[in-house]
Amino acid sequence: MKYLSQRNGYYWLRIKPKKALLPYLPIETKEYLLSLGNVSLVEAERKAHPVLTRWLEEIELAKKLAANSAPAGDDEHISEVFSSATTTEAMADTVNAWRDSAFPGNQNPNKPSEEFLVRSEMTAGTGRAVLPLFHLAEYEHSLRHLKSKTVSQRVSRIKTQFLPQVTYLTAKSLRTVKLQQWVDSYINIDEAPSYKTLKGYFQAARDYISWLRRKGYLNIEDTFDAVKLPTERQLSPQIDRESFSDSELERILEATKQKELSVLIRFAMYTGCRIEELVSLKLGDIHSKKERYIINIIEGKNENSIRSIPVHKEIEPILVERLTTGETYIFPHGSNNANGTRSDAYSKRFGRIKTKLGFGKEKVFHSIRKTVATKLEQAKVTEGIAADILGHNKETMTYGLYSSGSALEAKIDAIDLIHYEG
């Protein structure tokens, strides 16, 4: 069957559409990709057929939409036009079409949308408004003199921590009071960042806005200078979190009637991942190596959060089943709040269950992570390997600064030592 391939014993279904069709396709990545599991060719083709049919129908529809659409172009293409030293008449027409594509048309035809007004300001070059993500690719390219890991971390912080706070970049949305409210919002949350990490979030945002100002894309005053970051003491949790015992986790699982939350708890028990790391996992973040599935955390709370974790045999069957659903996310029912996080709904459900069972504020979902750390320590796993699994900082100069991390085999051996009674 076309588009079907086998890799490391597992069948995969994959289609990579043409770039011009991507704006018209209902996918978040640049390709369709689905694991069909460790099955026979006949079973793989049986599973692939209905999914492939749906994908091909979506691609055919995208072709028709692309053929009938005005040459507005996507944001990435238009951004290249904005950054060009010279502008041709054809380029100007493309930008105008891009601006007009945001007009509501038949819906309130006499009232332009807010996005149309922002695009109009950008087209006119007034510097009064900018779409938050519009110039981010160009900004990322301007950082090519830095190490790739540094660039990835900086861009990730802008996308996940700063830009979800603003609908559009304007003098009003970037007022000092708004920025102060943003940094203060990290005080006393369940997983508050360290002062150093929060300072990194703030500096990444400030650098991006400064770059927009230097390029002439945004014409506003520096509003970051008067912002005061919370102190380390303010960011520290007021309550010492405690780990769960095996019997306590068993009680919670028995009381959890919703399958999705039950699976999420089990994934936390056998990976030590933070809740947001788990609910942000996509199919493309799962790979196989040395006959084991590997979870790749590509974004997280800090630089150490970016890591690879072998999948424990206890949760591997659940993961394989989820890889064949065709969903974008491993946990597809996440929320999408103003801060850009997906874990709120799961966290609230867990909180209601553990409170009903009599657990206090010292035990939260994050306590499962402490349980995993305790399991690894009791199994005499070295601290460096445990840190690489959990995404913790290594304090020593040798491991913290120069080491590239633990070997995969060592992490597999450590993960397999995690065991629960009951």
Image (tube, rainbow, N blue to C red):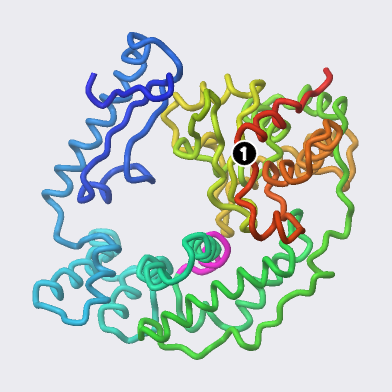
Residue displayed at 74% across by 38% down: 350
Q: Which residue is mark 1?
A: 407
Residue displayed at 61% across by 87% down: 225
Q: Is residue 162 something one can see in this rendering?
A: yes
Relative vertical location of residue 413 with respect to residue 91 in this rendering, above or below: above
Residue segment shown in magenta: 160-167
The image quadrant where one finds the C terminus is top right
The image quadrant where one finds the N terminus is top left
In the image, 283: left or right of 319? left
Q: Position of residue 207 (x, y in %)?
A: 51, 78
Which residue is at the front of the view, 104 or 3?
Answer: 3
**Magenta-colored stretch includes residue 335:** no
Q: Position of residue 269 (x, y in %)?
A: 73, 32
Which residue is at the front of the view, 137 or 70?
Answer: 137
Q: Residues within 10 Å of mark 1 (few under 14, many from 20)?
A: few
Residue displayed at 66% across by 74% down: 181
